[in-house]
């Protein structure tokens, strides 16, 4: 038996809702064999981050070599990267091993407000990893930082998406979890067409790790050989179901429910995919 192989290069969330833990749970639920290269250990729960312990760049390089020289990957993603040295090492290893497709989740700040990427590393992201990415998945504040502009209208978000592609990524999804309104709409652009993936907004405080889970789901689907737009559609279904059935864990912003996707079917037609110019 063979399984599609997916690698996450990201930080550990001791609370299990985001980071490596969310990625591996998502890979498993979507039928991919999950592997990891740890960039940092965080002491974290539903109430926030109380400690960050970065790996050395050497440790990240050795983990990637170990996986890529032996097992190989069908798709990979990055999440929390912590600092410029680790970022440059990851880019170098991806080029050296010639692996892809790559999904870059440009994690900068946790919802609890804690910084997960040093400020000087934000600029480095556009020069190192974005040019290697098949897809980059910023949330709205991250997209605004990448293009250094407020993206408070759809027209501005489309312009922002074009500018992110100018930085070298092949496609982008600007995620809509931070938008106001009754739908959670994610804007996809691949240089040819804009697609909006929308789902009803779920009113819950348990949205810790939504971005990690979403990008991991895209990665698992790419590992299976799905095309990019279909991979994003499945990821949207996965995250919507995971948010819709909260586990009510912890005293703060609890994790989403990775278990729900395969066991708790949403009504047909909840996710819409709209083409626009
Ligand atoms: N309350 C919500 N209801 C429905 N979907 C949501 C909600 N919050 C986030 N999402 C979806 O979860 C995914 C992750 O988005 P977002 O929360 O913006 O990312 P991040 O965790 O990186 O801030 C997107 O598909 C977004 O539309
Ligand atoms: C270790 C680690 N990595 C990434 C995040 C950010 O996760 P995200 O999916 O953006 O969700 P929130 O934390 O913003 O809810 C993290 N917190 N920890």
Image (cartoon, grey):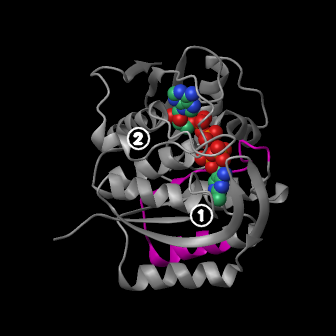
Q: Which mark is residue 10?
A: 1
Q: Which residue appears at 44% of the width and 38% of the height? A: 242
Magenta stretch, residue numbers:
88-113
Q: Is residue 175 visible?
A: no
Residue 229 drawn at (x, y percent): 37, 37
Instruction: Give left or right: position of 128 versus 1.
Output: right
User: Is the residue 165 above or below the residue 51 in the image?
Assistant: above
Assess disc 2: are there few (<14), some (14-19) or many (≥20) residues with their C-alpha within 10 Å of its C-alpha. Answer: many
Instruction: Give left or right: position of 75 versus 112.
Output: left
Residue 174 highlighted magenta (yes or no)? no
Q: Which mark is residue 235?
A: 2
Assess disc 1: are there few (<14), some (14-19) or many (≥20) residues with their C-alpha within 10 Å of its C-alpha. Answer: many
User: Is the residue 86 above or below the residue 259 in the image?
Assistant: below
**Is the shortest distance between ligand 2 and the CB of mark 1 under 8 Å?**
yes
Q: Which residue appears at 80% of the width and 59% of the height? A: 50
Residue 133 drawn at (x, y percent): 52, 54
């Amino acid at each position: 038996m063979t399984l599609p192989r997916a690698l996450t290069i990201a930080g550990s969330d001791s609370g299990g809702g985001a980071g490596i833990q969310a990625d591996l749970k998502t890979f498993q639920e979507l039928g991919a064999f999950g592997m990891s290269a740890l960039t940092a250990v965080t002491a974290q729960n539903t109430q926030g981050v109380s400690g960050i312990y970065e790996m050395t760049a050497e440790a990240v390089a050795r983990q990637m070599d170990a996986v890529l020289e032996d097992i190989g990957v069908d798709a990979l993603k990055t999440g929390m990267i912590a600092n410029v040295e680790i970022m440059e090492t990851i880019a170098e290893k991806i080029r050296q091993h010639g692996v892809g497709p790559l999904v870059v989740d440009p994690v900068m700040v946790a919802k609890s407000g804690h910084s997960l990427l040093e400020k000087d590393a934000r600029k480095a992201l556009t020069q190192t990893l974005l040019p290697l990415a098949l897809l980059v998945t910023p949330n709205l504040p991250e997209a605004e930082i990448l293009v250094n502009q407020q993206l408070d209208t759809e027209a501005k978000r489309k312009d922002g998406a074009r500018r992110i592609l100018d930085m070298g990524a092949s496609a982008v999804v600007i995620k809509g979890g931070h938008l106001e309104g009754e739908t959670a709409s994610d804007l996809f652009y691949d240089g040819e067409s804009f697609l909006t993936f929308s789902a009803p907004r779920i009113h819950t405080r348990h949205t810790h790790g939504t971005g990690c889970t979403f990008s991991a789901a895209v990665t698992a689907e790419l590992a299976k050989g799905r095309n990019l737009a279909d991979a994003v559609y499945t990821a949207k279904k996965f995250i919507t179901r995971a948010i819709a059935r909260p586990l009510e864990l912890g005293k703060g912003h609890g994790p989403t429910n990775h278990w729900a996707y395969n066991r708790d079917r949403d009504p047909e037609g909840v996710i819409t995919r709209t083409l626009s110019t």
